Amino acid sequence: AQKVTQAQTEISVVEKEDVTLDCVYETRDTTYYLFWYKQPPSGELVFLIRRNSFDEQNEISGRYSWNFQKSTSSFNFTITASQVVDSAVYFCALTTNTGNQFYFGTGTSLTVIP
Amino acid sequence: EAQVTQNPRYLITVTGKKLTVTCSQNMNHEYMSWYRQDPGLGLRQIYYSMNVEVTDKGDVPEGYKVSRKEKRNFPLILESPSPNQTSLYFCASSWATQETQYFGPGTRLLVL
């Protein structure tokens, strides 16, 4: 069975601090895909990144970076120098090559305090 | 503009009154899906469709029906809504199962 765990329910940081959102996944498939989505207070779901299981390179996009470690089944998301606009709920998700379902974590609510 | 649309955006109904939430995408995507979002539970997949006339259950299909008669449309049907179906519903689409899903704006449903 597939599962995504986001143990951090809520995080608060002061603006300009760095923050890491944790994502731990479970799957027996060797080929799988991991995603991060952002849900700002306005409610829409915004795609941030997709990573396949064969690509363990870390990715950086501006202030955002992702650390994928197969050894610990984790796909963590770091925001550097956080800003108030980063305040949102962030979801990690998983799908596999052999299944057709998507599995989301329960989300981490990030509040950036000015 | 490439998008997924859902209607209505907000709906208040009463127990037992059948309703349909429509979902349409203009990206020619094969895969479409419905999710519900509840506090503390994240997004849970209700049903998904790999292509026209191909649908399958997700993790929480009870009380819902779907159909995929056309590639662009994937309506969610609640035949007899109950208060525990009060939730925020999202439709999504993608080229294939393993590809990035793009979400509609959401439908907030309240069942009294």
Image: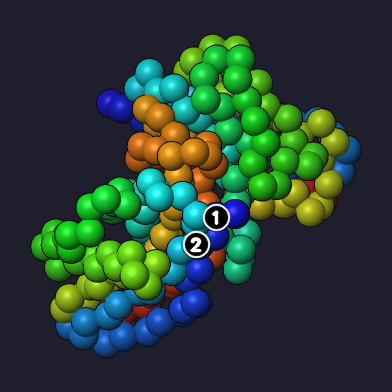
Of pointers 2 and 1, the one earlier in the residue sequence? 1
Residue farthest right in this picture:
B16
In percent of width and height, residue B37 lies at 59, 54
Place of residue B25 in the rendered image (x, y in percent of width and height, measured from the top left): 43, 24
Amino acid carrying label 2: it is: Glu
Where is A107 relative to A12, above or below?
above
Q: Is residue A84 above or below residue A38?
A: below
Query: From the viewer's perspective, is B60 left or right of A30?
Result: right
Residue at mark 1 = A2
Callout 1 amino acid = Gln
Observer able to see residue B14: no
In the picture, which quadrant includes the N terminus of chain B? top left
Give the tally of numbered discs. 2
In the shown orientation, is residue B22 left or right of residue A58?
right
* Residue farthest along the top direction in this orientation: B70
**Looking at the image, which residue is at 49% across and 77% down?**
A7
- Determine whether, in the image, residue A69 is placed left or right of residue A73: left
The dot on residue A26 is: 2
Q: Within 10 angstroms of label 1, few (less than 14), some, or many (20 or more) residues?
A: some
Q: Residue at x 21, y 76 (%)?
A: A82
